[in-house]
Amino acid sequence: MPNASQACATCGNVYDKAFQVTANGQSYTFDSFECAAQKLAPTCEHCKVRILGHGLEAEGGRFFCCDHCAERAGVKGLRDRV
């Protein structure tokens, strides 16, 4: 039986194949990539999807999944491609 230290940081599931991710100096245990993404991936300020790719970051730590969403939120000058 897995121990409680292997409980997923997102859903609490105790899983014998759990894995750890260290981000910003903090370590997390997850039972799936889905749970890791829910806990750690930024959210697009406009459409609210989790940003699993590069995404775009505006001044002030504002995150967007694409330039379309950034423009809809009033942010100018960000581009998906150069």
Image: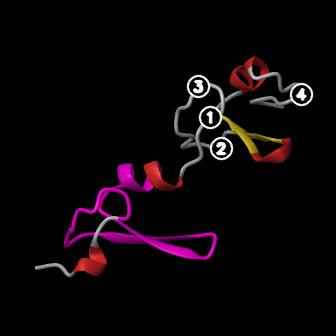
| 23 falls in the magenta region | yes
Q: Nearer the viewer, mark 3 or mark 4?
A: 3
Q: Which residue is mark 4?
A: 77
Could you say where residue 41 lies in the image, as x and y percent from the top left? Answer: 54, 49
Magenta stretch bounds? 9-37
Q: Label 3: how many residues lie within 10 Å, few (<14), some (14-19) or many (20+)?
A: some
> Distance of mark 3 from mark 1, alpha carbons?
6 Å
Dot 2 alpha-carbon crowd within 10 angstroms: few under 14, some 14 to 19, many 20 or more: few
| Residue at 58% over, 25% down | 47
- What's the distance in space between the residues labelled 3 and 4, CA to CA? 19 Å
* Mark 3 or mark 2: whose residue is earlier in sequence: 3
Mark 1 vs 2: CB contact within 8 A: no
Mark 1 to mark 2 CA distance (whole Å): 11 Å
Q: Residue at x 67, y 39 (%)?
A: 55
Q: Residue at x 37, y 49 (%)?
A: 34
Answer with mark 3 or mark 4, whichever residue precedes in sequence: 3
| SS state under label 1 | loop
Residue under pointer 1 = 44
Mark 2 secondary-structure assignment: loop
- Residue contact at pointers 3 and 1, CB within 8 angstroms: yes
Q: Quadrant of residue 53?
A: top right
Q: Nearer the viewer, mark 1 or mark 4?
A: 1
